[in-house]
Amino acid sequence: MRPILMKGHERPLTFLKYNRDGDLLFSCAKDHTPTVWFADNGERLGTYRGHNGAVWCCDVSRDSTRLITGSADQSAKLWDVQTGTQLFTFNFDSPARAVDFSVGDKLAVITTDPFMGLTSAIHVKRIAADPDDQIGESVLVLKGPQGRINRAVWGPLNKTIISAGEDAVVRIWDTETGKLLQENEKEIGHKKTITSLAKSTDGSHFLTGSLDKSAKLWDIRTLTLIKTYVTERPVNAVAMSPLLNHVVLGGGQDASAVTTTDHRAGKFEAKFYDKVLQEEIGGVKGHFGPINALAFNPDGKSFSSGGEDGYVRLHHFDPDYFKIPSI
Amino acid sequence: MADVMSMEDIRAEAARLNIDLSSVDWNSIRLPPGEDFGIKSDDDDLNEEDSLEFDAGFGNIIVVDNLPVVPREKFEKLEGVVRKIYSQIGVIKENGLWMPVEEDTGKTRGYCFIEYNTPQEAELAKEKTNGYKLDRAHIFAVNMFDEIEKFMKVPDEWAPPEIKPYTPGENLQHWLTDEKGRDQFVIRAGSDTEVLWNDARQVKADPVYKRPFWTESFVQWSPLGTYLATVHRQGAAVWGGATTFNRLMRYAHPQVKLIDFSPGEKYLVTYSSHEPSNPRDTHRVVLNIFDVRTGKVMRDFKGSADEFAIGGTGGFTGVSWPVFRWGGGKEDKYFARMGKNVISVYETETFSLIDKKSIKVENVMDFSWSPTDPIFALFVPELGGGNQPARVSLFQIPSKEELRQKNLFSVNDCKMYWQSNGEYLAVKVDRYTKTKKSTYTGFELFRIKERDIPIEVFELDNKNDKVIAFAWEPKGHRFGVIHGDNPRPDVSFYSVKGGKVAKLVTLKQKQANHLFWSPGGRFVILAGLKGFNGQLEFYNVDELETMATAEHFMATDIEWDPTGRYVATSVTSVHEMENGFNIWSFNGKLLYRILKDHFFQFLWRPRPPSFLSPEKEEEIMKNLKKYSKKYDVQDQDISVLLSEQDREKRKQLKEEWERWVNEWKKHHEEEKMDRQMLRDGEASDVEEEYEAKEIEVEELLDVSEEVQDV
């Protein structure tokens, strides 16, 4: 089926997120306005105005009422999904990068970049049920990793936080004590910046994508490396199908080098791999620049990709896709 | 640093420190870099190599002996004379001329020291003035200062050299006896150099030997595949064997830049060029010819870059490599180089010029040896504004007899192409049109093996077409030409069999600019490199049909394996992206592909010519079915084995994955209650309850509507 081209952002896309029901798609971009779309037909539903910098990441609560966004304007904001009103602003001294709601949506993890002598940090905030009771105090602040922390997500039962970023190391932190529980072994880990991280639907394993041209699948509890997917391009975005044993890797040649070569050299394809066999199955072309964001619809029947070219492409799978043999 | 300890001392020290020596794992001890604790290294030869470079602190000083002995009054005059002679050769350092005198008499001692800025100048001075006649009684004896010590050490009595017992070497041809008949190749990527088997049946490359920092610039196989040559600052080295790749020989040549083997790989030519100290001078060039097996220098050539820069038709600066071109087939009997108005042919028996003189050819532009016979062809351009025609001549060596000559008119340029058996020579002639504004192309075909060497002239269908590429079928009688001015040129194939050039076919509008014939002939790849981004067409010239078209995006290099069974296409580091190589079957099926960043070189290991007699080869060709049966069975076995392995692997992966999935399910189930708690008792987190959830949402919407009503 033809992809639906969603033109709404003026700058490169940074992040995509479906709500749990799979009817809404939230997109973040380097322009300052996160946008929500109908996940079925790609119609624009609304925007969230208020940020004053690139928006790097977002998460939506389980009941699709709250949206949290992290932005380069040194803030993270809570929004009412339906009305688009700002409910609360968490202010920081450096740009906010990754955001993630915990199980139960009572906590959120927000990472901040190293900036003007400040090191990067992971902040845990309590999210009040009533926005009027919301306070900006952090429950927990974790520091230690060098460079940006590009993604941080909650582990099972909110007992751990998994972080990954520029230093190419995946870390697991204890949310009770704030201690570092585990780092991945150097030899098996990524060699360059980890750009993306996606959890499985049941939160039992996660996939990391890195500029070292590979993606790796890890067990969330033991940090065991289960699979490695090797590609030809730096990986900027990863996603896992909730339905089939497929993983999707997106990326491409660095944006600064794009104009110097043939468009085919860029490999701006979303590449599908068999999750178990680690073999490439196919690719979806279309973007005119590297893919920065990928997300699967929770029903596994469509996925969307966001590119450096400023477009979101929404792909509903053909029936043939579901007939791809698997083991 | 402590003095060397004896074992006794060590034991005593160990006892004092309460260490049980027997429990110490000596191999696990690592000394800090640069520190040896007085323990002598046992691989001295590595250090020796280094000393070559660093000990030569006086390499720029020469000693001039046999000077006249003069009294004090004449000292300045003599110094003036010496300075004049030696400052012509290079820049003498300030206070770099020192002539010692006897203290009591004030007379000179008859020798002096001269210090130059560079060792190259010193060497040049030694070369030029050793034996210089100042007058009848004073003939200079010039030596390098560094060598004095060496000469002092020469023992007075001759001692017979020790004869080393014979140790059998490794069988250097061992790789040819591979049971599966595979071929090897070498790749260089990053700092690693690696030799691999092309295991095409198993569609993978099988590693043989890998070594980081094996070479400092490039690697090169010898023409028969026996050696792999590496290039270092101190010189070149060759390595060999099937799997071990031991170093067989080293060839000292500081700052060597280029190397070249003779076709029979008996000799190795090394080349270096050195920056002059005086910017007005040209670069100094040093060439050595080594005997590959003994490592002995057979002959060296030194001179200015100008002397060696002649050659090539373009008249570009720098040397055209190889400087020495080898002729006369695999016997390595002759080599030649082109000089100004001469061609110098040397023979390897004495390493001197044949008949002690070069062949005089006014204004020779280019020459090229027959690949098999001691015959070369040379090209002389038009002289005197067209009064004297251009000509192509064939010379026989060692008789220096001119076998055939052809005069050509209004010629712009000539290029010579020998067929690999030396049977034909095609000369591509670019002529001016009448207006002299443009050129057109014709060919002169020499049939070398026929009586009197008949010459045939032929032109392309459209003689104004620009010729982009020309290539003979190896060992065959056909050639291919890429021609045309369009963005998509045409490709034509011709046969020269039967005394007449006959066109076989013209393929229109191809995206190709290079032709790569299989070493066995018959198959050819029409390749579009560079501007065409790596288009490949596998073409069968026997059947005149395309077998396959493919693309290796951005490919820069294409090489057939020596048997003509497989082709390697590679993207080297001229591109930033896509680095790596593909292996294809002869008919254009992609077998496997390997990506490597910073990919520099891909080289198949050449094979020596087959030992089978032509009759035997023909017999095999005739009964190919019979012979191929054996291999068909092997192929079958391997494909069964492969699918078996594949199934096994898949099964294993599946089981492993299921183990993980089950474990995750278990954990998920265990944590169910806790999760519900975290979600304030909301139970649904499983897919099946998805529908129910949707209904819930609808109810919620109803509630909100009621609110609006109020």
Image (spheres, helix red, strand yellow):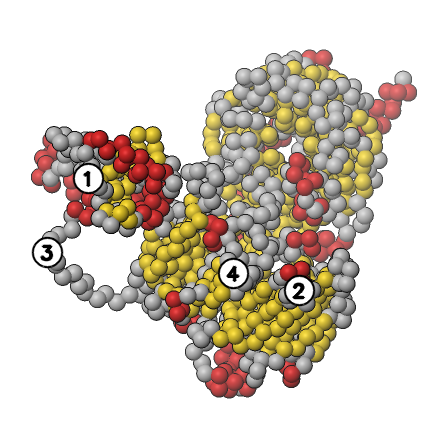
Query: Which residue is the extreme one toward the right?
Result: B709
Viewer-closest of A201 and B15: B15
**Disc 3 secondary structure class:** loop
The image quadrant of residue B115 is top left
Q: Which residue is mark 1?
A: B69
Q: Amino acid at mark 1?
A: Val
Mark closest to the chain's N terminus, 3 or 2: 3
Q: Which residue is mark 4?
A: B341
In the displayed structure image, the side of residue A181 where residue B437 appears, left or right: right
Image point 44% across, 49% down: which residue?
B304
Alpha carbon separation for disc pair 4 and 2: 19 Å
Q: Mark 4 or mark 1, which is nearer to you?
A: 1
Viewer-closest of A194 and B130: B130
Q: Position of residue B73 (x, y in %)?
A: 22, 31
Circle 2 chain: B
Q: Crowding at label 4, few (<14), some or many (≥20) Cα neighbours within 10 Å?
A: some
- Same chain check for tags 2 and 1: yes
Alpha carbon separation for disc pair 3 and 2: 68 Å
Q: Which residue is mark 2?
A: B387
Q: Crowding at label 1, few (<14), some or many (≥20) Cα neighbours within 10 Å?
A: some
Image point 87% across, 22% down: which residue?
B706
Q: Position of residue A49 (x, y in %)?
A: 78, 21
